[in-house]
Amino acid sequence: PARARARDPWTHLAAHTPARIALGRAGPGLPTREVLGFALSHAQARDAVHTPFAADEVAQKIEALGLAALAVESAAPDRATYLRRPDLGRRLSDRARAVLAELKPAPCDLALVVADGLSSAAVHAHAAPLIAALLPRLEGLSVGPVAIARQGRVALGDEIGEALGARLVAVLIGERPGLSAPDSLGVYLTFAPRVGLTDAARNCISNIRGEGLGYDEAAFKLAWLIAEARRLGLTGVALKDESDLARLPPAGATLLPKR
């Protein structure tokens, strides 16, 4: 047994990661359990992409937090088109554009957009709890109506934020499913949103889920980035996430437990 462990140093590492390592072998192939596990993960990833977005349920959860919710959709008319035409997912439909134009909201410090993206399962599970963890950290900021966007890509937030007169927009969106994370939520923060920006103008917080970044930690990072974006007047490659430094003990403080 000791010699076997020495020959396979990966085995003990498998307990610390969902990545597919130390799978073993059965002859020239993989063990049956690993083949079946891979097939299950692949099916879960496909389901995450194609599961219909329960926008009304998400809106109800957000309204229960005391925020107004607004239904919009991208220019992609259906899921099949959305997957084939990413460009349509970055633009509002004519109807949604008209709705926002008629709304004429007061300018706000922050607009929130909740979009299905490539994993509606992630949005169903994590969007409302993340917003609930974030709101207490936004004291003193005005938050516009939350746009619940069907068939949305990240850049859809630029047009929505511009229409809402928001100084910042945060897009909560289902990330592309992986074979170990079909329900991962991402957040993209953009200062002075407007049509035509690229991803270089955004800051991203990813892997928000039970097995990844928790709601409180993600909310802390997002609130820190919002504060820094307002102070510096920018987001993106020029804004480095140094939120972890804000949680370090002050210089000279002891890390030893008190007796």
Image: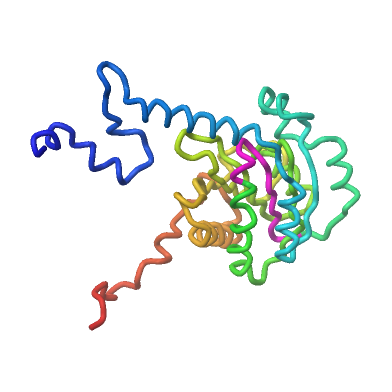
In the picture as drawn, the residue positioned furthest to the front comes out as: 32
Query: Where does the image place residue 255, in percent across and percent down from the top left?
Result: 26, 72
Q: Residue at x 64, y 41 (%)?
A: 120
In this view, the residue in front, 155 or 206, is 206
> How many marks can you see?
0
Q: Is residue 114 magenta?
A: yes
Residue 58: percent from left, percent from top: 71, 51
Q: Is residue 107 above or below residue 184?
A: below
| Lateral position of residue 20 relative to residue 80, left or right | left
- Tell me the residue at 75%/35% (across/down): 91
125 and 38: which is toward the camera: 38
Tell me where residue 158 sits by quadrant: top right
Q: Is residue 208 above or below residue 11?
A: below
Magenta-drawn stretch contains 112: yes
Quadrant containing the N terminus in the rendered view: top left
Residue 155 appears left or right of 187: right
Q: Residue furthest right?
A: 102
Q: Residue furthest bottom?
A: 259
Q: Quadrant of residue 79?
A: top right
- Outermost left residue: 3
Q: Residue at x 45, y 50 (%)?
A: 211
- Above or below 64: residue 164: above
* Magenta extent: 108-122
Residue 163 x/y as whole percent: 79, 48
> Percent position (x, y) of residue 29?
31, 19
| Colour option used | rainbow
Does residue 81 appear to the left or right of 170 in the view shown? right
The answer to which quarter of the image holds residue 143 is bottom right
| Residue situated in front as seen by the camera: 211 or 116 | 211
* Image quarter hosting the C terminus: bottom left
